[in-house]
Image: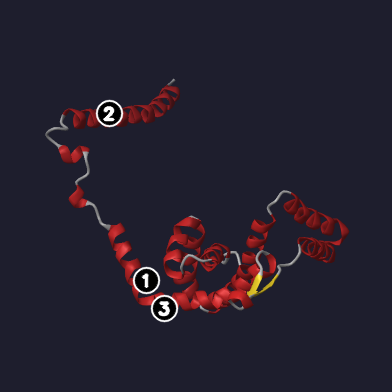
């Protein structure tokens, strides 16, 4: 009987503790509600105590944009060369010259791209994979999404090699310098994959302009950590 009574008391103690906690919390809420006229700071957080983090970040971004826009726009110009070539090859036309003397070279035919996709799939995994890849490209064309898909493919065709090269060198640096991997690389990689994509797309637009290069860099930031 003594053992049974002790076990029953031990099980009832957590229940009593939680009841006391909930009773105390309800009493505190009721007290604040009744005294809200006398204690306004307990109802509304005082504006003077708010830390202006948003203002600090805005000021920092304005300073970076004013002092480093020449560097970021130079990077945009360099990365824009292969990106414009890929987009012109797959999604847009090549335009050479200006005015009446402009020469327009058409993009790759959708038939040619589908055949190339089929041949690439066949070389990588046989006839079944080739038929699957070619069928997927044909599906995109039949449903009127070809231009959008080729824009994405052109963007990825430049972003993926960039991510591979960047990830390779960063990985080698992390292997050779454990302190850099622990203090710099790991926290940066965690931030790059946990922060939502559109959260760092806005700074990219401010620094690199409203261009496909900004989207490519944002894609690279998210895709580099697995590399």
Of circles 3 and 2, the one toward us is 3
Determine which residue is flagged by label 2: 26
SS label for mark 2: helix
Q: Residue at x 51, y 78 (%)?
A: 177
SS label for mark 1: helix
| Residue extending farthest left | 38
Q: Is residue 71 visible?
A: yes
Question: Could you tell me residue 157's position as x and y percent?
Answer: 66, 68
First in sequence: mark 1 or mark 3? 1
Determine which residue is flagged by label 3: 70
- Quadrant location, the N terminus: top left
Q: Residue at x 76, y 61 (%)?
A: 110
Q: CA distance from mark 2 to mark 1?
A: 50 Å
Closer-to-camera residue (129/27): 129
Instruction: State the image quarter where residue 219 is shown.
Output: bottom right
Determine which residue is flagged by label 1: 65
């Amino acid at each position: 009987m003594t053992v049974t009574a002790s076990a029953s008391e031990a099980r009832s103690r957590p229940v009593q503790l939680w009841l006391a906690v909930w009773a105390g919390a309800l009493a505190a809420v009721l007290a604040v509600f009744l005294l809200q006229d006398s204690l306004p700071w307990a109802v509304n957080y005082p504006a003077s105590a708010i830390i202006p983090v948003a203002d600090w970040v805005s000021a920092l971004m304005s300073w970076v944009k004013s002092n480093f826009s020449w560097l970021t726009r130079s990077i945009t110009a360099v990365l824009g060369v292969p990106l414009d070539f890929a987009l012109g090859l797959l999604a847009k036309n090549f335009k050479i010259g200006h005015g009446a003397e402009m020469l327009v070279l058409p993009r790759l035919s959708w038939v040619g791209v589908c055949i190339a996709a089929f041949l690439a799939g066949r070389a990588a995994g046989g006839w079944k994979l080739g038929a699957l890849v070619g069928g997927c490209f044909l599906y995109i064309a039949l449903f009127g999404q070809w231009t959008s898909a080729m824009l994405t493919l052109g963007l990825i065709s430049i972003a993926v090699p960039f991510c591979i090269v960047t990830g390779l060198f960063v990985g080698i640096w992390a292997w050779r310098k454990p302190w850099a991997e622990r203090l710099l690389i790991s926290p940066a990689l965690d931030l790059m994959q946990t922060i939502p994509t559109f959260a760092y797309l806005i700074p990219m637009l401010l620094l690199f302009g409203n261009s496909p290069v900004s989207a490519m860099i944002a894609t690279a930031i998210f895709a580099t950590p697995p590399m």
